[in-house]
Image: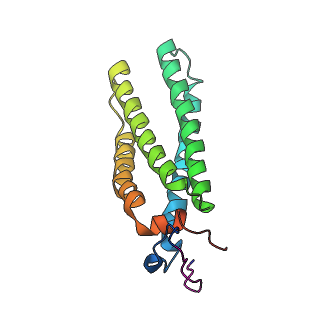
Amino acid sequence: MTTQEQPAPTGKDCAVNAANYDKINGWLLIPAYLHPLVRVGSNIYASLQVSTLLATPGLSPDAMAYIVALLASCIVFGIAWGACGYFAYSLKPVFPKTYIWTSIADIVVSALFLGITYAAFGLDAAPDETAGLIKMILAAMIWIPYMLMSKRVKATFYGEPVAR
């Protein structure tokens, strides 16, 4: 979606540089919508898998507490990523910061759970869990600097409201 037909905003108080106001939204919103939706889907899938572990007979109290904490984190991050998707869709100025902090928190909590799995239970991380953490780190390495420095992000989320 471009707004080349709209005139550039005027005035000194405008947060958008008029020279960089050629496009709003554009391709930026595709990953802004898709990444949170993919994370919501993966958290729903993980919640379903973890919830089946609760029915396992003979779990120790430590293992039960770990599973409940893991399930709670899947639910919390599913909601947080859903909020990020909503903020991106509605072009809320809070989206870039919410995206950044949700990414960082998701990486830290995932690494913490992998560490607890190894330290408390003596289990090595499954290859797909390690690969998932590496993918989250790579996505954060790309998108966090982009959210912080991009003129397009500033124009889309902090500029004048766009007519839809």
The residue positioned 58% from the left and 69% from the top of the image is 160
Q: Is residue 142 left or right of residue 161?
A: left
Closer-to-camera residue (7/133): 7
Q: Colour scheme in the image?
A: rainbow
Quarter placement of the C terminus: bottom right
Asked whether residue 63 is drawn in magenta, I would say: no
Q: Is residue 89 left or right of residue 100?
A: right
Say above or below: 116 vs 9: above
Closer-to-camera residue (49/154): 154
Q: Position of residue 132 (x, y in %)?
A: 39, 46
Closer-to-camera residue (123/9): 9
Quarter-of-image position of residue 93: bottom right
Range of magenta residues: 2-11
Q: Position of residue 89 (x, y in %)?
A: 61, 61
Say above or below: 15 vs 129: below
Asked if one can make out residue 60 in the rendered structure from this viewpoint, the answer is no
Asked if one can make out residue 112 in the rendered structure from this viewpoint, the answer is yes
Q: Position of residue 53 (x, y in %)?
A: 54, 27
The residue positioned 51% from the left and 30% from the top of the image is 70
The residue positioned 54% from the left and 40% from the top of the image is 77
Say above or below: 58 vs 1: above
